[in-house]
Amino acid sequence: MPHFTRHQIGYNLLSALRVAGLGVRDEFEGRQEPASWFFRCLAYDQSELDIMESGAIDALHAPSALVELSLDEVALAAAAIGPDGLLSYLTWEVEDEPLGEITPPLPEDGPVARFHPDIQLGYLALDVAPPTLWMEERRSDRESNEELARRLAVMAQQVGGDCDVIEVHMEGSLDASEDGWADRTAEVRPAGVSVHFTLEIPLAGIGERELAMRFSEGARTAAAAIEGMRLVFGRLTAGER
């Protein structure tokens, strides 16, 4: 990837989301630490985003995907110059005596320098969540909460086949009773629900084609999870009403 920069990689991610029928808003980029750069955006179904931005309604209650791409800039630089280029920055030393530049070995001379397979160029993280209104409208009790968690887990497994990590997150909120917060019978309702997916982007063997394929897999997962979230809550709402 000698011609890739972090901004070109971010643009490729946006292109993959568009191909999957997703529109984005609230784009943001920055640094989490000296050698880590991230790009973050909020993705919606494009047709619903068009309605939202047209001003036809005050608020659109639709599921969304928080998409975050994080890149290791050291790995990105290493990918740009390749293993041989990386070796040109190093010298052999014995007891602080420089012995000259390292010459990349030819195959017949011994092992060839390659990137370690465990080094990651970056990660693509997706957090798909329902709108707050959907959580407020549904019934909240132990059985309903367990059913919601089960349906979300099944949906996540169905749409996240290309992902390296799949998680269902449910944050609880305790409703105080007349006897106060210490009442053990007080109900705990899910206050925040999301389905999390992570796709790893390895440094070894990655190129423009492989990166585009990885972004395409992430975009398809986000689009499928948004529709899956709609189906999960639609079925629950229909059953409870």
Image (spheres, rainbow, N blue to C red):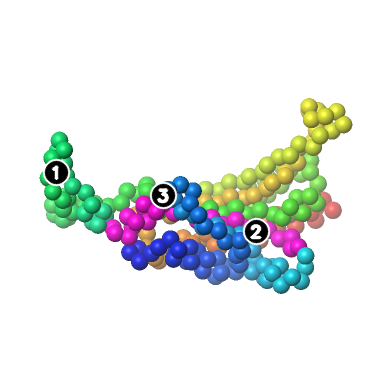
Q: Where is residue 37 in the image (x, y as percent from the top left)?
A: 46, 54
Q: What stretch is highlighted in magenta?
A: 59-82
Q: What residue type is labelled 1?
A: Pro
Q: Where is residue 75 in the image (x, y as percent from the top left)?
A: 36, 53
Q: Which quadrant of the view contains residue 134?
A: bottom right
Mark 3 or mark 1, which is nearer the start of the sequence?
3
Q: Mark 2 points at which residue?
A: 64
For numbered disc 1, what is the local secondary structure? strand
- Magenta segment: does it hold 85? no
Q: Distance between the residues labelled 3 and 2?
A: 29 Å
Mark 2 or mark 3, which is nearer the start of the sequence?
3
Front-most of 184 and 99? 99
49 sits to left or right of 133 = left
The residue at the point 54 percent across, 62 percent down is 219
- Disc 1 to disc 2: CB gap under 8 Å: no
105 sits to left or right of 117 = left
Spot the residue most to the right.
Answer: 178
For numbered disc 2, what is the local secondary structure? strand
Residue 119, relative to residue 25: is it above or below? above
Q: Quadrant of the N terminus?
A: bottom left
- Neighbour tally class for label 2: few under 14, some 14-19, many 20 plus, Cα within 10 Å: many
The residue at the point 72 percent across, 55 percent down is 131
Q: Which mark is residue 35?
A: 3
Q: Distance between the residues labelled 1 and 3?
A: 29 Å
Q: Mark 1 points at which residue?
A: 98
Viewer can see residue 177: yes
Q: Which quadrant of the view contains residue 98?
A: top left
- Magenta segment: does it hold 74? yes
The residue at the point 41 percent across, 49 percent down is 35
Residue 7, relative to residue 194: is it above or below? below
